Amino acid sequence: MTELTQEKERVVLAAVATGSVETAERSLDELAELARTAGAEVTARLVQARESIHPVTYLGKGKLEELQRVMDMTDATGVICDDELTPAQHRSMADAVSGKIMDRTLLILDIFAARAHTKEGRIQVELAQLRYRATHLTGMGQALSRLGGGIGTRGPGEKKLEIDRRRIHQRIGQLKKELKDLERHRGERRKRRAGSDKKVLSLVGYTNAGKSTLFQRLTGSQTYTDDLLFATLDPLTKTGYLGGGKTALFTDTVGFIEKLPHHLIVAFRSTLEEALEADILLHVVDASGSAVEEQMFTVYQTLRDLSCTDKPILTVFNKMDQADPDRILRDFQAQRSFYISAKTGEGVEEMRAALYDMICGGTQEETV
Ligand SMILES: Nc1nc2c(ncn2[C@@H]2O[C@H](COP(=O)(O)OP(=O)(O)OP(=O)(O)O)[C@@H](O)[C@H]2O)c(=O)[nH]1
Ligand SMILES: [Mg+2]
């Protein structure tokens, strides 16, 4: 796939370890993946163990000096912090370090901006970007106008970077109105769908778990899959065959991630809520990764934030072709678990048969 940015940014990743260093390192691995997805090159990583994040400068004073040295040494153009910076932290870091100051939120917003294709998706991302910019304007303005490209300057809101707060708020108001109109249309679509007696199954899960790959297997449709974070953004619903002449509707959704920016959840809430307005949630888990439990925890947390835990959840342990065979994989919160490989097809037919039993068996009971 084509790279998201034309000019490759060279960045240092920085994190504060308030708990274990391993947790911080794992989070940095993910940040590195996000940076790669956004087309940036990571030149170095820096972790500071501290009791808490410095309220004004994010890193401590000595570490900031080290950061500057590392940036100079590796010829980096900027730094990406693993947490969302407060406007104050953003400003003080911009004063202390020469280069572009970015954070996890900006990076995720940037990736979303490049991925949003529907009108609604683009408005939602622009809204989230503008809200972020409105609070971070002073910290970002200088660095952005100096570099004139790269992360944080992309997307629907790109042209509006230099505009002042007042106009940002005007634009936010306008976008919110446009979004309302689109939501009304969606409400009508939703009603039509509710009129059909087909069951709806939504695929949810951590980003890169294999939701779209499984969606393709179940519905036979071509969607975009990639070994990049947030390959899917706009939800997609298609009919899938269950067997015995029965079909169901499957919805592919955006992946979740730890520290998903609050602005994004707010902006995407209605889309997500619709996507999750399903009879059953299929929770797709990457069973081959090193953070299986942590990722499952994040998914449940996000589902709770979206008030979606009242539905039956089936957990699909995916990528079993690459999983450690000795590893015990269980999900006590799920009604049932499956073990499959969406890539090789292993276990998919058994799962389909089980879904058929659950869905069509249930219907028969009801009619009795
Ligand atoms: N080995 C292996 N790889 C898989 C399997 N399923 C998916 N993948 C790979 O995992 C990567 C991510 O797959 P996607 O289907 O795009 O994942 P997703 O959950 O839709 O990701 P986002 O849309 O980014 O949230 C791709 O490179 C897939 O080829 C599997 O069963 N085994
Ligand atoms: Mg996907």
Image: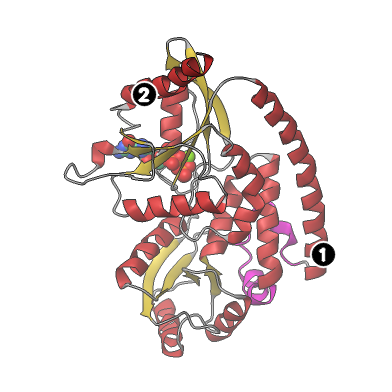
SS of the residue at dot 2?
helix
For the point 33% across and 32% down, the residue is 343
- Residue lying at the far left of the rendered structure: 326
Residue 131 position within the rendered picture, expressed as x and y whole percent measured from the top left: 69, 63
Residue 270 position within the rendered picture, expressed as x and y whole percent measured from the top left: 66, 45
The one of 276 and 81 positioned closer to us in this rendering: 276
For the point 54% across and 45% down, the residue is 308
Q: Amino acid at mark 1?
A: Arg
SS of the residue at dot 1?
helix
* Of the image marks 2 and 1, the number of the one nearer the N terminus: 1
- Residue lying at the far front of the rendered structure: 368
Q: In the image, which disc is placed on residue 354?
A: 2
- Residue lying at the far bottom of the rendered structure: 62
Q: Is residue 164 among the parts visible in the rendering? A: no
Residue 160 position within the rendered picture, expressed as x and y whole percent measured from the top left: 74, 60
Q: Residues within 10 Å of mark 2 (few under 14, many from 20)?
A: some
For the point 41% across and 56% down, the residue is 33
Q: Amino acid at mark 2?
A: Ala
Part of the protein shown in magenta:
137-162
Q: Is residue 139 among the parts visible in the rendering? A: yes
The one of 251 and 200 positioned closer to us in this rendering: 200
Task: Left or right? Give the position of 214 relative to 57.
Answer: left
